[in-house]
Amino acid sequence: MRDLTTAIFSSPFFGITLSIVTFFIGVKIQAKCKTPICNPLLIAIVLSIGVLLLLDIPYESYNEGGYIINLFLAPATACLAVSIYSRLGILKQYWFPILLGCAAGSAASMGSIYLMCRLFGLDEALTYSLIPKSVTTPIAVSVASAHGGMAPVTIVAVLITGILGSILAPVLIKVFRIKDPVAAGLGIGACSHAVGTSKALELGEIQGAMSGLAIGVCGIITVLFSLLL
């Protein structure tokens, strides 16, 4: 019986099933509570960690399936091009503000992290792990690794940034009275990548399209800026 249990937990299907079930629960909880704090991804993380700790399952066993899910991250990010294509007219109309806004957002994100890391005396490896926190995971890991950063730290930083962005974005939009959907979408995508874009899509089609666009533009700009570090 013990061997059977070990085989089940070591199977890739366990990690995949656990991830899907916990995220599904998170979606249901958010739909019922209707508050940004109940973020489905955050709930899924907490539930997954709880199951692993409760059943004393090694992370390596869970990651047999989690790694397979991670392989779909880059294609899923590329699929955001569909929403961008549907708003090509807006892209052509606002190409300069979009480029300038994404450049400013990337510079602010990278610059603030660099200065704070220097202020708190963090070493270079940790600094370069945190600098690309505001772009999507595949790009962030590549940028961090190229400068000697630690991929696990970068992934966690990107995840936290995305969750905080999705939670705080609707509040900040109201506080600063941002009426333009293009500006709102670009701001969300520039600071909280794909996780934030999921929230932008809930706010509106234009916000979602512009947030998806910001992911790609900010990713390219972040790679270029990282060459100056």
Image (cartoon, grey):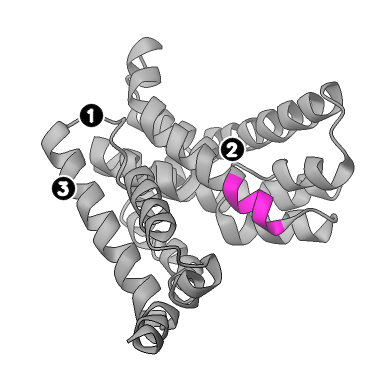
Local secondary structure at mark 1: loop
Residue type highlighted by circle 1 = Thr
Count of labels shown?
A: 3
- Residue 103 location, quadrant: top right
Image coordinates for residue 17, horizontal then vertical, percent: 30, 71
Q: Which mark is residue 28?
A: 3
Q: Secondary structure at mark 2?
A: helix
Residue 83, image x, y percentages: 33, 55
The residue where tag 1 is placed is 35
Q: Quadrant of the C terminus?
A: top right
| Magenta region | 151-156
- Residue under pointer 2: 102
The structure residue drawn at horizontal position 34% and vertical position 62%, both measured from the top left corner, is 82
**Magenta residue check for 154:** yes
SS at badge 3: helix
Q: Position of residue 95 (x, y in %)?
A: 52, 41
Q: Main secondary structure of the magenta part?
A: helix
The answer to whether the residues at label 3 and label 2 have Cβ atoms under 8 Å apart is no
The quarter of the picture where the N terminus appears is bottom left
Tell me which amino acid carries mark 3.
Lys
